[in-house]
Image (cartoon, rainbow, N blue to C red):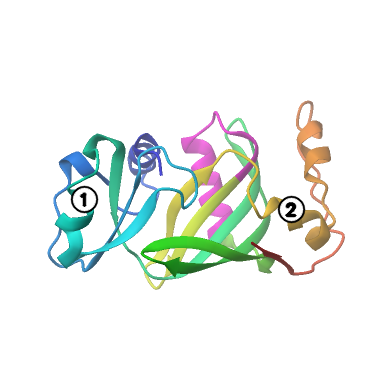
Amino acid sequence: MNFLTYQRLCRFEIQTIPTQRLVDAQIDARCNEWIVKAIDGVGCMDSFVVKREQWLLYTQGLDAEKYIVQPHLQGRKISLSALFSHGLAWLICVNEQHFELVQGCYQLRQILVNALSPNRVYVELLQQIAQAFPELWGYIGIDLIENTEGCWVLEINPRLTTSFVGIERATGINIAEQVLLMLDAEPCLHVKRNDVISVKL
C-alpha cells in the first residue's frame, strides 16, 4: 500500500492495516510477525514476512526510506472488483484470493472470481472509499483481509487486476463496455450469470 493511501484511509476513518514507514517504525513487542513491503510496490512484489526474532537480519540492509511495515494479519483474503466514478462506486463481484508463502514471500496462486456473495459491508466500504478518493475512475480492485475484527483494506489497485480476466465468464458483464458507458452515464451492471471462475497463476 502506498503510504499516502494509508494516510488518507485513516483520515476518512476507513479500517485499514496499521502502517508505518520503515525509517520511523516502532515495533510492537506483542506482534510476532510483520510484513515489510516497498512503499510504492505492486501486488506482492518486493514484500516479505518477517518474524520478530529475524527483524534486524531482514531489515538492516534495506533502504528504510523506501519501505513500509505492517503487522501480519491473518484472515480470509478477498478482493472487490468495482467501478468508480467521481465519488461513486459500483460493486461487480467479490473474489477470494489464495496465496502460498514461499521463502517468506507471498505468491498469488489462485483467484476464485465471484466466489462470495455481495453484502452490505462490501457495498458500504466501497462507497466510503469512493468518497475518500473521488479521483478514482474506471475499473478498480480493492484487496481486503477479513477476520473476526472486520474488513481491513489492504490495497487499492487503480488498474486491471488478475480477477478481471474471469469477470465476464463469471457474471456476463463486459467491463470494457461498462467503462465506455461511464464516459456519459452510469454503468449498467446486469448480471447474466452467477458462476465461480477459477483463475490460476
Q: What quarter of the picture does the C terminus occupy?
A: bottom right
Three-letter code, disc 2: Val
- Mark 2: few, some, or many residues within 10 Å (few <14, many ≥20)? some
Three-letter code, disc 1: Thr
The residue positioned 80% from the left and 59% from the top of the image is 171
Q: Which residue is mark 1?
A: 59
- Mark 1: few, some, or many residues within 10 Å (few <14, many ≥20)? some
Q: Main secondary structure of the magenta part?
A: helix
Residue 11 figure quarter = top left
The residue positioned 49% from the left and 44% from the top of the image is 42
Q: Is residue 150 left or right of residue 124?
A: left
| 17 or 70, nearer to the observer | 70
From which residue to which does the magenta span run? Answer: 121-140
x, y percent for residue 147 = 42, 70
| 5 or 163, nearer to the observer | 163
- Residue 151 appearing in the image: yes
Q: Quick one: SS at disc 2? A: helix
Closer to the N terminus: mark 1 or mark 2?
A: 1
Q: Is residue 116 left or right of residue 154?
A: right
Q: Is residue 145 left or right of residue 134?
A: left
x, y percent for residue 70 = 29, 54
Q: Which residue is mark 2?
A: 165
The residue positioned 20% from the left and 66% from the top of the image is 31
x, y percent for residue 66 = 30, 36
Looking at the rendered structure, which numbered label has been put on residue 37? none
